[in-house]
Image: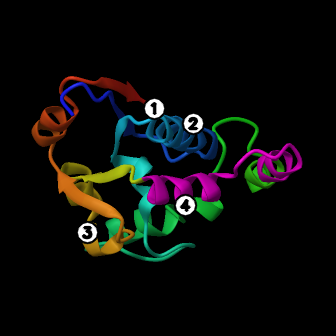
Amino acid sequence: MGNQKKLSIIAFSGDFDKLTAVFTLATGASAVGYETNIFFTFWGLDAIKRKQGRAFIGSNWLTRLFGFMMGGLHVTPTSRFNFFGAGPRIFRRLMKKNNVATLEELVEAAKVLGVNLYACEMAMHVLGLTKDDFIPEVKDVLGVASFLQLSDGGQTLFI
């Protein structure tokens, strides 16, 4: 399998539209045989939280506040035209109307297709999170050097 194509995506944003792009690219690449890796860092970690909804998770009062603000996929805002939180609902309705997979459906498809999900160790330390705070499909917690080794020889995107 030395010739297998590889796509690695750094998911930095927790915005609905950007996470939709991350999971659309990842599932598309995986579906056509690419080894696909997503490295979630900072606000991107919101996409792989185990506890959905607003929850005070973290190791101290400040990280718990960040944990509360990061409410998971169901409350993630759009990067533009959020309309006080209505933006993602509007997009979901439009996606369903046009037979396009929603963000939640894309995340489930990524799990089924075997997309490799990784959490950024440094961002987790800053935000007071542990591996237990994430969905079980998170394969590992990695530092930057390990992610660079993992993504070597393929294409890497930053979203």
Q: How many marks?
A: 4
> Residue 65's spot in the image, x, y percent?
43, 68
Instruction: Mark 2: give few (<14), some (14-19) or many (20+) Cα within 10 Å.
Output: some
* Residue 70 located within the stretch drawn in magenta: no
Q: Nearer the viewer, mark 4 or mark 1?
A: 4
Q: Nearer the viewer, mark 3 or mark 2?
A: 2
> Residue 1's spot in the image, x, y percent?
21, 34
Instruction: Report the coloring of the rendering.
Output: rainbow
Q: For this view, does 11 lie left or right of residue 150?
A: right
- Res. 159 mark: 1
* Residue 96 located within the stretch drawn in magenta: yes
- In the rendered image, which residue does mark 3 sit on? 131
Mark 1 touches mark 2? (CB < 8 Å): yes
Distance Cα–Cα, label 4 vs label 3 = 19 Å
SS class, disc 4:
helix
First in sequence, mark 4 or 1: give its number: 4
The amino acid on which the numbered mark 2 sits, given as a three-letter code, is Ala
- In the rendered image, which residue does mark 2 sit on? 21
Q: Name the foreground residue: 43 vs 31.
A: 31
The amino acid on which the numbered mark 4 sits, given as a three-letter code, is Glu
Mark 4 touches mark 3? (CB < 8 Å): no
* Residue under the point 48% across and 52% down: 110
First in sequence, mark 2 or 4: give its number: 2
> Residue 6's spot in the image, x, y percent?
31, 30
- Res. 108 mark: 4
Distance Cα–Cα, label 1 vs label 2 = 8 Å
First in sequence, mark 4 or 3: give its number: 4
